[in-house]
Amino acid sequence: MRPFSTVFWVAVILGSGVLHAAEVPVEHPPFKKDQYVHHAPTVDDLMKDQEIKPQLKKVILKGRDIFMNTQQYRGKYVFSRLSCKNCHLGEGRLNWSGPIWPAATTLPDYRGKNGHVNSLEERIAGCFSFSLNGKPPEYGSDIMLALSAYHQWLALKAPVYETHIGGRGYSSLGKDIPKDIHYVQGEKVYQAQCAICHGATGQGKSVEGKVVFPPLWGDDSYNWGAGMARVYTAASFIKNNMPLGKPGALSDRDAWAVALYVNSQERPQDPRYTGDVKETREKYFNFHQYTMYGTERDGVLLGQHDNTGAKPFLKPDALRPRTFDE
Amino acid sequence: MMQVHRGWLFSAVLALTGVAHGAGDPEKGKLIVTAGDGSGAPCIACHGLDGAGNDLAGIPRLAGMDAGYLVKQMRDYRSGARKSAVMSPNVDNLNDGQIADVAAYYATLDTAPTSLPSGAPGALALGEALATKGDWDHYIVPCETCHGPGNVGVGSDFPKLAGQHPTYIKQQLKAWKTGTRNNDPNHLMLAIVGRLTETQIEAVAAWLARQDPKGGK
């Protein structure tokens, strides 16, 4: 066969394409009647916006850059191999993927996780401390200001203190693990649906040192104190966002099972660790009642170790209590 | 004798477990690429000895592609999982070892891209936006989220797009859209392609074709 006939056949094949492939749906839970549904602005909107000063635009874009490539601070503020965008898909704008703008409209507010009123910066510091297994940039620093500006701009035109928000957070499947969800089933789902990107052992994939697919467990992933370590958080995230491009593709049961599987693997220590995992689990039971931390898997107590991953300390100084009693 | 036997056993285990991907011999591969296997056309007839392919004819550039990816595509042509009236009859008599050799040969090549199409600035800007930022409001994930930084490819499942011929990229995206290609793992590509408009396909193909296959700027 010579080249010209190849061209001919390619033309024939192209000309015959009249069928249409079945489209893969994007299935998200419906919004509830009384919920505020936000449409966060895009970078294109920002560039066109005449009301926002160019100096502020620059800072907002800096915040976006930090959000999208938080790995630029690996070894300084981030000791995992994760970036903000890994848990907050679609530039932090996407409903059902933990959109970040509500932090700008609902904080300061009381948070059960640390038992006091948190500012936006403090909330961001929480992500650095737990999800990124890192050390938060200083309060009031340029990085914090840029990230805050990015959050607040994404909230453009959203009502302040509105808390009935459609697609917020990750809890669409409820908080309690259904009774008949099993680790072994989760492992099957993981290997069939997730391993192609995140690797057979959850290590993720990188190209020339740059993370492409984030690690889901092990030293380079979120630590035991991260919201994503809660089985329900991961289950809802997976249900509404994974496999990438196919939200809603997994059944609820498969999403729960694979979340249980992923969150039953070892990961860096919870920065709030007291030295005893069962004690720590009890002390922060309002959080750990939803994680597998301090429970047994195949005779091994999960989280009973001193491994902080690549982070050379346990607890960042930014994590501290706050009272207004004086 | 003992060593031969062991070697054979090792190969058999590799073939059975599918670990043989990319384990081919580029020198042997070069012979097949040049002379063919006695049936069908030799690869060089269309893809060239340098693996540069041909944009106008819609023949993909193979130089520097991941060997495991090329192995899977050739196996899929052979089994019919990926359909091509041209490729299937040309690879149907290649055994797994020969496929691995051909893949290893093309994977090792370092050929400069031959086609740098001139795209309209507007189209290129749209293509760049899709490839690097996506269009999340329509759930179009940026190409580089899976195809890696600079779209240079990630392992054997997410092929290099940078520097690929635009005609071929367009053909493939349209093949997914029409259902004539569906050999992507977990249908991760199908999900995205179904949401792309014709204009977006044109734009993203034009932009990707102009990128450095090695990821440079």
Image (cartoon, rainbow, N blue to C red):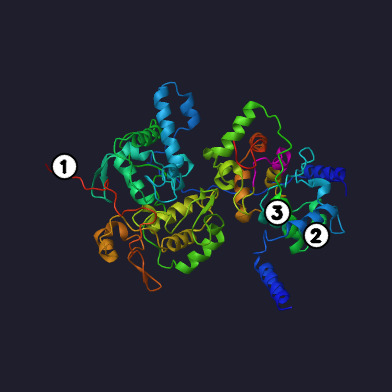
Chain of the residue displaying label 2: B
Q: Which residues are magenta?
A: B160-171
Badge 1 marks a residue whose secondary structure is: loop
* Residue type highlighted by circle 2: Asp
Please state which of the two labelled residues, at mark 3 or mark 2, is closer to the viewer.
3
Badge 2 marks a residue whose secondary structure is: loop
The percent position of residue A253, horizontal first and vertical second, equals 47, 61
On residue B70, the disc is: 3
Q: Around disc 3, counting alpha carbons within 10 Å, would you say few (fewer than 14), some (14 to 19), or many (20 or more)? A: many
Q: Are marks 3 and 2 in contact (CB under 8 Å)?
A: no
Where's the C terminus of chain B, which quadrant? Answer: top right
> Label 3, label 1: how many angstroms apart (C-alpha)?
64 Å
Mark 2 lies on residue: B92
Chain of the residue displaying label 3: B
Q: Quadrant of residue A326?
A: top left
Q: Around disc 2, counting alpha carbons within 10 Å, would you say few (fewer than 14), some (14 to 19), or many (20 or more)? A: some
The percent position of residue A202, horizontal first and vertical second, equals 49, 59
The percent position of residue B208, horizontal first and vertical second, equals 64, 38
Q: Around disc 1, counting alpha carbons within 10 Å, would you say few (fewer than 14), some (14 to 19), or many (20 or more)? A: few
Answer whether residue B80 is visible to the viewer in this image.
no
